[in-house]
Image: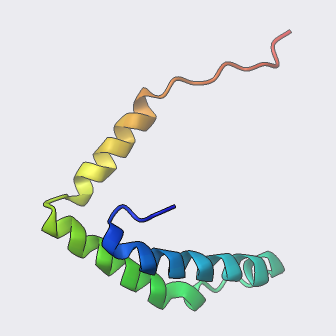
């Protein structure tokens, strides 16, 4: 999946690749130290924030949009009824 800003795609791909390695090679073997990918995450986050600022997008707008989607989602009916 691409980043929300095309300028950040390469950083996102590098972070995603690092995260996959960390998750499979470390986390699943009991190592929960997340520092391995932290520098890439920080660079990706900086890129996103820069692009959001350039496009006048506030983090509150994104959080509110996601909250509204979750709030308005219809609960799925249970198929376990007898």
Q: Residue 79 at what x, y percent from top left? A: 78, 19
Q: How is the image coloured?
A: rainbow
Q: Is residue 61 left or right of residue 38?
A: left
The image shows a total of numbered marks equal to 0
Q: Nearer the viewer, residue 52 or 29?
A: 52
Residue shown at the point (81%, 13%) measured from the top left: 81
Q: Residue 18 at what x, y percent from top left? A: 60, 83
Residue shown at the point (50%, 86%) measured from the top left: 38
Q: Is residue 57 left or right of residue 76?
A: left
Residue shown at the point (30%, 78%) measured from the top left: 47
Residue shown at the point (79%, 75%) measured from the top left: 28
Quarter holding residue 78 = top right
Q: Residue 35 at what x, y percent from top left? A: 56, 89
Seen in the picture, residue 36 relative to 7 is either above or below; the reply is: below
Quarter holding residue 3 = bottom left
Q: Residue furthest top?
A: 82
Seen in the picture, residue 73 relative to 39 is either above or below; the reply is: above
Quarter holding residue 46 = bottom left
Q: Is residue 61 left or right of residue 40?
A: left
Give the quadrant of the C terminus: top right
Q: Is residue 81 left or right of residue 75?
A: right
């Amino acid at each position: 999946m691409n980043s929300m800003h095309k300028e950040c795609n390469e950083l996102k791909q590098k972070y995603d690749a690092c995260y996959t390695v960390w998750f499979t090679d470390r986390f699943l073997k009991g190592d929960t130290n997340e520092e391995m990918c932290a520098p890439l995450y920080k660079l990706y986050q900086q890129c996103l924030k820069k692009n959001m600022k350039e496009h006048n997008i506030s983090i509150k707008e994104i959080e509110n949009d996601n909250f509204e989607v979750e709030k308005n989602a219809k609960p799925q009916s249970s198929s376990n009824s007898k």
